Image (cartoon, coloured by chain):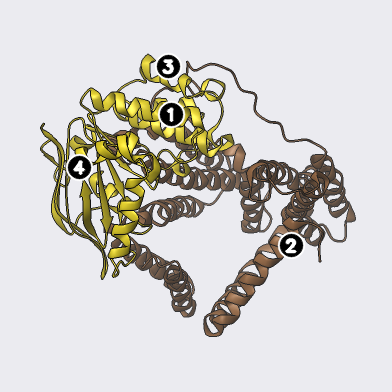
Amino acid sequence: MSEMLVIRGAALRYGDHVVLNGVELQLARGDLLGLVGPNGSGKTSLIRAILGLRPLSAGRIEIDGIDVASDPRGARALLGFAPDPALLPGYLTLRQALDVAAAAREQTASDALLAFGDTLQLAPYWQRRIETLSLGTRQKLAILIALLGDPPLLVLDEVLNGLDPIAGFEVKQELQRRCANGTAVLLATHGLEMAPTLLTRAALLANGHIAKTWNADTIAQWRHEDPAAFERAVVATLRQLHDFRPA
Amino acid sequence: MSSSPDLLSQRLHYRNWLDERRSAPAESVFLLAAGLSFAAIAVWALAPGLARLKSVVTALPDGLAIAAAAVLGASGVLTVLQRHAQLTQLQRSDWLAAQPISATVRAGFRRDQARLRGWLSAMPGIALCVYVGWPNPMLATTALAAAAIAIPLALTRKPRERPYRDQRSAASVRGARGLGILGASLEPAAARWPHTARFAAASLLLVPMGSGPVLVVALLLIATSLRALIDLIAHFAERLTESEAWLGAQPLAPQRLLAAFAPTLARRSALLLTIPLLALAASPAPLALWPVAAVAAVLGTLHAVLLTHAERHHPIRRRMHGAAHVVLLLLAAQILPPLALVAWLTVLLQLWRRRNV
């Protein structure tokens, strides 16, 4: 499989404070990789670096061969990202915000995407202003924004938070469907319990680097034999890292 | 203890602020001293203006003066409506929304806050009427009566919830589509009217001795338009920053985002610049007013663009702040040399507290 996302020696610091220190990670087409880690371990900082919103102090990030640092717009055209629901513009309606985000990609929201929105039970909310919507409904919009234009790489940060059971189920199904069609997905999450049934790989970010990875075979084995094993493995690894320091 | 959790929360907020001030006594004393210095200078600078204004108002026809007083007195109405609607919206989903609090108690808090804001907004106008209208009590009575009737009336109006249509197509704002929706969604100037009106009323203090009604009206128009222009630019900078935050991960060139706002911004700026130019041309204003108007517009733009928008951009933050500080120092030094250092230190202190330098 060809690599969709390649992170080599990524380092990031805020002043004297080291957040990322030599992160190495690859994501192939069809991968659904779960990025897990304690609060403050640098997951969101790593995602912002992948998006080209936070310049690295060392290392390199490539999306389908495009260097994010030298061509951030070219790289962003290949990825879909779900913005933080709190940052969505409260003064626009849900439908308007979707159109604005589509225009930012020089596209329009496809019928298939709108239909998926209806599947997520957004039908009563299209013409409602975002400021009047619940966290879950805003999260659904953020997910639709990530899916605009069917990008080959999806970067998602805690997108399953706040979703109702039907929407959560549909989003997971959609992610798996897209992965089966060759989309690569990086999903930062604390939802360890659903990992074996959803992910194909997992990586633990702690102390500024990837402390451990679990491959597809291991995850598949847990899926069939012991779905709770992943959660135990993550907790055990974190407990071994006595010197864990929040970023 | 108050039975309103909103009120209690507000009191605790003030108490925490006071505690914070007490924990940094040197800084608090400096800020207080700086504030008092500025207030003293303001009174010193405005006193001749008030005397001039008194002569102008005395020369105005009674009907026009009373109408102006009524408008000033009722300026609190829009403030009340806006604050009431804002609090109603906030309380629908705030952290206390799920608590078993009586709806009457929460509504009472909303009304009290909106009423207070309305009176605070109307009082400067009323005070001005009392001062300039003396010994003719009609002006003050008109202003006070207008506020006393209008503010409670405004509170009887229930904020409306926007209706929604159950459809997923045809997203547009005033005919704009796509990125253009961002520009078309800029609030109209009327949304910030109470703020603008206060500024325009204060501009009356600049009216020269013996001016006729034409110049007074022209000056009001100029002040209102320039304030609305400054508000428009500040609002644009705010919206641009917000848009960058949620669209940051899209493959969007910065100039396309700017272009989304350009048509609305250009149209409204042109209108808000044409009004003062026409007013200046129609009035017997001295030529000196032209550069004053131009400097006010430039200062407003600098304030809005440099300090509101540019400070969010890390790589240029220090240079932008440096430039803004030099401009501020130069301007202050031209007018009040001894206060330049105090003004600069005050701004620096505030920025340092916000960890922006």
Left or right: B234 in relation to B159: left
- Closer to viewer: mark 2 or mark 3: 3
Q: Where is B115 relative to A165, above or below?
A: below
Q: Are marks 2 and 1 in contact (CB under 8 Å)?
A: no
Q: Earlier in the sequence, mark 4 or mark 1?
A: 1
Measured in 3D between alpha carbons, the distance from the residue under mark 4 to the one under mark 1, in whole angstroms, is 24 Å
Image coordinates for residue A50, horizontal then vertical, percent: 23, 45
Residue where numbered disc 3 is placed: A115
> Looking at numbered disc 1 in the image, what kind of residue is underneath it?
Phe
Q: Which residue is mark 1?
A: A169
Query: Which residue is identified by label 4?
Result: A215
The residues tagged by marks 4 and 2 sit, at their Cα atoms, a distance apart of 54 Å
* Residue sitting at x 42%, y 50%: B301
For the residue labelled by badge 2, is the local secondary structure a helix, a strand or a loop? Answer: helix
Q: In the image, which disc is placed on residue B8?
A: 2
Q: Residues within 10 Å of mark 2 (few under 14, many from 20)?
A: few
Q: Secondary structure at mark 1?
A: helix
